Image (tube, grey):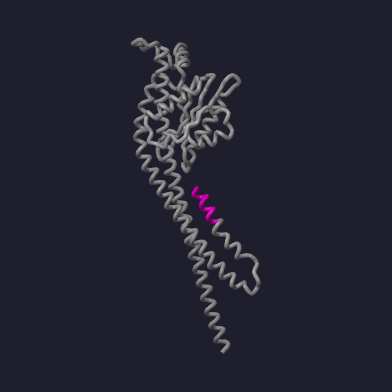
């Protein structure tokens, strides 16, 4: 966005120079050259002003992103304790082969945050290719405006649900659990695959896939053994059946994983925006240095030319006497 503003400002401000450099009559050539010097100096001055304003904006956006990151980072780290017990109990098997798969893609609603949105879209498309088949069905659930805009171009028919402006209000578990409940009510699945960016540091994030299986698949995998075979070692108390317990576990697991994924993705977004705005501020500073050098050179050349003209005129008057 910042670079597009700079390009637009450059095209707008450089337009008068092209008009002055058009062919002129021989009697007006000297006047035209003076006009080129004066207007080019004005153009560089205006360009410097535009770059300074953009630099102020990028620095302010970096500070805002840093403030939001500090507010969300602690909550994201604490939320990791919610889904880890489910992984220990039910496992996380992303390569499981099922007939109905749903890919939940988490992205941001705003841009200027590097490549976090394009990364999760690439991973989601890769999951679609891996799980699609003649007797298999793969659907998408898109969270975030940026992933929605990208996925609608070529995967519109495979999108079951879209959610935007999730980060408009401060994130909490109740808000995310309502979102998880809407997803469970509107899609049929054997496996839910949540694609998000896991936060590591301000400059590093890792695309991650978390898998949540349906109660039927969990019970089936538990019967045949494997990673879910340890469920039979637990005793069931109360009047609930094993199927009801698995249903409650699957729903609670999905809401906990979604809560952690949304917070991790928000941290990655703020960290990537900080890095992007820092790079933009440094690029604006370098451009401002180059423009300042160009302005000083142009101004010095103009002053030197005017001094030469004055001295030449004085010499011509003395020679005429």
Q: Main secondary structure of the magenta part?
A: helix
Q: Is 296 placed above or below 266 here?
A: below
Residue 246, compared with residue 68, is above or below; it is above
In this picture, which residue range is highlighted in magenta? 1-10
User: Compared with residue 125, is residue 1 higher up or lower down, i.e. above or below?
Assistant: below
Question: In the drawing, does residue 173 fall left or right of residue 292?
Answer: left
At 36% from the left and 10% from the top, the residue drawn is 239
Task: Residue at 48%, 62% (x, y): give it.
Answer: 45
Residue 294 versus residue 143: which sits nearer the camera? 143
Number of marks in the rendered image: 0
Tell me, yes or no, whether the highlighted magenta stretch contains residue 8: yes
Left or right: residue 192 versus residue 34 is left
Image location of residue 181, percent across then percent down: 43, 24
Image point (50%, 23%), residue name? 187
Does residue 8 appear to the left or right of 73 in the view shown? right
Q: Residue furthest bottom?
A: 321
Picture quadrant of residue 222: top left
């Amino acid at each position: 966005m910042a670079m597009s503003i700079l390009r637009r400002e450059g095209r707008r401000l450089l337009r008068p120079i092209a008009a002055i450099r058009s062919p002129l009559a021989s009697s007006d050539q000297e006047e035209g050259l003076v006009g080129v010097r004066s207007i080019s100096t004005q153009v560089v001055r205006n360009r410097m002003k535009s770059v300074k304003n953009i630099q102020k904006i990028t620095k302010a956006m970096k500070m805002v992103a840093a403030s939001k990151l500090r507010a969300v980072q602690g909550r994201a780290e604490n939320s990791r304790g919610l889904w880890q017990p489910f992984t220990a109990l039910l496992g996380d098997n992303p390569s499981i082969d099922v007939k109905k798969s749903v890919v939940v893609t988490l992205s941001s609603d705003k841009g200027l945050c590097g490549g976090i949105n394009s990364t999760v879209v690439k991973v989601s498309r890769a999951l679609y290719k891996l799980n699609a088949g003649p007797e298999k069905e793969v659907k998408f659930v898109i969270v975030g405006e940026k992933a929605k805009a990208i996925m609608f171009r070529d995967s519109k028919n495979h999108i079951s649900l879209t959610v935007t402006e999730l980060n408009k209000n401060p994130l909490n578990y109740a808000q995310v659990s309502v979102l998880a409940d809407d997803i469970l009510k509107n899609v049929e699945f054997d496996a839910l695959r949540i694609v998000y960016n896991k936060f590591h540091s301000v400059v590093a994030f890792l695309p991650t896939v978390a898998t949540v299986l349906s109660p039927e698949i969990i019970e089936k995998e538990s019967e045949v053994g494997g990673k879910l075979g340890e469920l039979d070692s637990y005793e069931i108390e109360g009047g609930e059946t094993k199927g009801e317990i698995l249903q409650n576990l699957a729903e609670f697991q999905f809401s906990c994983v979604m809560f952690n994924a949304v917070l991790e993705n928000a941290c990655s977004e703020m960290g990537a925006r900080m890095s992007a705005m820092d790079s933009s501020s440094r690029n604006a500073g370098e451009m401002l240095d180059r423009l300042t050098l160009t302005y000083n050179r142009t101004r010095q050349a103009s002053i030197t030319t005017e001094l030469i003209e004055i001295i030449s005129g004085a010499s011509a008057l003395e020679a005429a006497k």
